[in-house]
Image: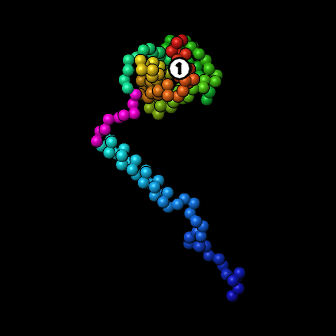
Amino acid sequence: MDSQAQTRRPALRSQQKEMIPAVLLRAMFGIALASLVMVSYAVYTGREKVGQPEASAVVREKWIVLEGKDAKHVVVRDTNGNVLIDLPEGGFITVIQSGVHTERRKKGADQTKPVRIVEYANGRLAAEDPETGWSVELYAFGADNKAAFQKLLDM
């Protein structure tokens, strides 16, 4: 029988070398497992959270309503419904509005309720949503992004 006439059978194993070394795969699974063990231990023992900002006195605050018009456009209103600023290219303010909107949608909260912008004595600037408990540290996103909300506080 001619060797070309025989039907080729697929090999059970690829003859090529593995793309990711087995040692690396084991190390990745080991890191994931170690992380799971550490987090589980912290939760089980009630370990105090350490990555939260320190409490500080409120220097000033402002309640605003963030109204998203589309992916970039946001209108900022005061609690009386007066337009503070209409931003067709809202930038970072649109990002925060989107985050608030997402959290409220997940929790079934009213989208028209105001958000609290708070400046603390220790320099922190935060947006806090009392409807969902969601908050974001605005100073952590850089000076320009913090300045956008500082302007809102000044209005």
Q: Is residue 10 above or below residue 77?
A: below
Q: Can residue 109 be seen in this view?
A: no
Quarter of the image where the N terminus is located = bottom right
* Residue 32: image location, x then y, percent: 43, 50
Residue farthest to the left?
A: 45
Residue at (47, 16) in percent of width and height? 63
Q: Is residue 109 left or right of residue 87?
A: left
> Residue 78, how many percent across, how many down?
51, 14
Helix, strand or loop at mark 1:
helix
* Residue nearer the viewer, 5 or 119: 119
Residue 148 figure quarter: top right
**Label 1 Cα neighbours within 10 Å, binned few <14 / some 14-19 / many ≥20:** many
Q: Which of 97 and 137 is in front in this view?
A: 137
Q: Where is residue 154 in the image (x, y as percent from the top left)?
A: 52, 12
Which of these two is toward me, 141 or 78?
141
What's the residue at 53%, 20% (across, down)?
A: 149
Answer whether residue 60 is visible to the viewer in this image: yes
Q: Mark 1 points at which residue?
A: 149
Dominant SS of magenta comes to loop
Q: Is residue 46 magenta?
A: yes
Q: Give the range drawn in magenta.
A: 45-53
Determine whether 1 is above or below 99 in the image: below
